[in-house]
Amino acid sequence: MTIDTTTLLAIIAMAVVTYFTRIAGLFVANRLVLRGRAKAAFDAIPPAVLVAVIAPTALTTGWAEAIAAAITAAAAFRLPLLGTVAVGVVSVVLLRGVF
C-alpha cells in the first residue's frame, strides 16, 4: 500500500480546518451576549440538530422504531436523560419483539 502525499496533505488540512472552526465557535460563543429572540434561537439549536439526526432513522426503519421514538419523546418530558435513554432502549427492544 502506498500513501499519496497529496491525499495525505489534503486530509490533514481538512482536519486542521475542521478543528479550528470548532474551537473558534467556542471562543466566539463565549463573547456573544444574547438576549430575547437570539437567545431563544441559540437555545433551540441542540434539540433541532438531535431531531434532524434521529428522525430520519426512526421514521424509515420500521414501525417498532417509530413507535419507540414517540414513546421516548414523551418520556423525555418527564424523565432525566438516563431515564429517557433507558425507556428508549427498552421500548425499541420490546417493540421489535412484537413487530
Image: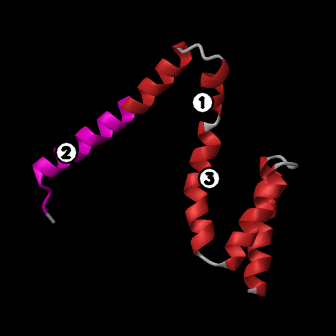
Question: Where residue 55 appears, x then y in whole percent?
Answer: 60, 61
The image quadrant where one finds the C terminus is bottom right
Q: Main secondary structure of the magenta part?
A: helix
Mark 1 or 2: the one toward you = 1
Q: Find the magenta span and give its range.
A: 2-20
**Which residue is label 3 attached to?**
51
Q: Is residue 62 above or below residue 5?
A: below
Q: Which mark is residue 89?
A: none
Measure the alpha-carbon separation of dots 3 and 1. Answer: 15 Å
**In the rendered structure, which amino acid carries the disc numbered 3?**
Val
- Is there CB contact under 8 Å for labels 1 and 2? no
- Work out whether residue 19 or residue 78 is closer to the camera in this orientation and state it: 78
Measure the alpha-carbon separation of dots 2 and 3. Answer: 32 Å
Q: Earlier in the sequence, mark 3 or mark 1?
A: 1
The image quadrant where one finds the N terminus is bottom left
**In the rendered structure, which amino acid carries the disc numbered 1?**
Phe
Q: Earlier in the sequence, mark 1 or mark 2?
A: 2
Question: Where residue 77 appears, x then y in whole percent?
Answer: 83, 48
Mark 2 or 3: the one toward you = 3
Measure the alpha-carbon separation of dots 1 and 2. Answer: 32 Å
**Which residue is label 1 attached to?**
42
